[in-house]
Amino acid sequence: MSQLFRLTRNVRLSGVRALAGIGLLAGVTALSGCQLDTISGNTSPQGLVQFVNAAPRYPTMNLFIDSTSVLTRPQAYDSGSSVYVNALANPRTFRITAGTDTTTIASAQLLVANMSVYTIIATQHATGAGLLILPDTVSPLPSGQIGLRIINASPSAGPVDFYLTSTDSTLTTPVASNITFEGTSGYILAPTPNGAALRVRITTAGTKTVLLDVDASSLTEGQARSVLLMDAIGGGVPVTWLAIPDRG
């Protein structure tokens, strides 16, 4: 079963789902506008940071930049948010807390570049959480191409392989292999589907066991998307996912 995303809360669905949308994050309205043209309307040097809570253990997480609380997010299955960050010469410190607890669970530093977009992902560890910061500023893609990136934020999935296929269910050679927890595939370029079938399939590394099967056939020329692989609501498998619009 294939369904297109709408600007509503994300609901975990089974089967094949669509990685379509015109700059949409799967069910997350706040992140749909995280593009460079949004930043360019502001006069001071700044970047844009989008925050996703992908740690099922924590129903609510808070993002601090330096000592300032800037965002409070439920789990990614509900929504996500973005915030402008001044681009300064010194690195900014990002840290997260859970609920009303003021204890820092994880932190990381980032030198924010002007006119750049970043995704910050809270990931679940055996104890506590991690903080993954990824650049989402994508240069224009070559003519006739789309870009896809897998982000593995699912500790239960373990290392995974990434396949791009048509309607044929045969899995031959992955376009990226052994993507470990908190790792990424980097952006993989593919010809624009132009209505033809294009499926993103994620398997357990070294096997043909499909963990995720996503319909990417509605992507249009120049679009780039990240597929964020996450544990199920409450943790564990089956895995779920979000699509992050990196360009277009």
Image (cartoon, rainbow, N blue to C red):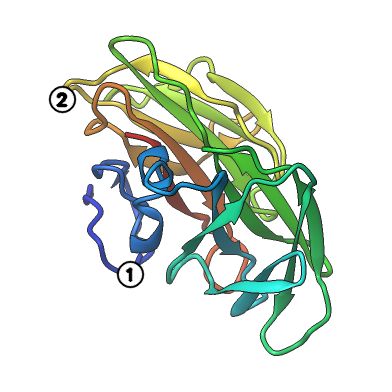
Q: Residue at x 15, y 25 (%)?
A: 195
Residue 188 or residue 86, whichever sits in front: 86
Residue 126 or residue 218, whichever sits in front: 218
Q: Residue at x 24, y 42 (%)?
A: 22
Q: Report the disc number at residue 9.
A: 1
Which callout, 1 or 2, points to the residue nearer the camera? 1
Whether the residues at callouts 1 and 2 have beta carbons within 8 Å, the answer is no
Assign a secondary structure to mark 2: loop
Q: Quadrant of residue 52?
A: bottom right
Where is residue 176? Give x, y as percent: 59, 22
| Position of residue 62 in the picture relative to residue 141 (left or right) | right
Where is residue 77? Give x, y as percent: 45, 67
What amino acid type is highlighted by mark number 1? Arg
* Residue carrying label 2: 195
Q: Residue at x 38, y 62 (%)?
A: 30
Q: Report the disc number at residue 126.
A: none
- Point out the image quarter for the C terminus: top left
Q: Residues within 10 Å of mark 1 (few under 14, many from 20)?
A: some
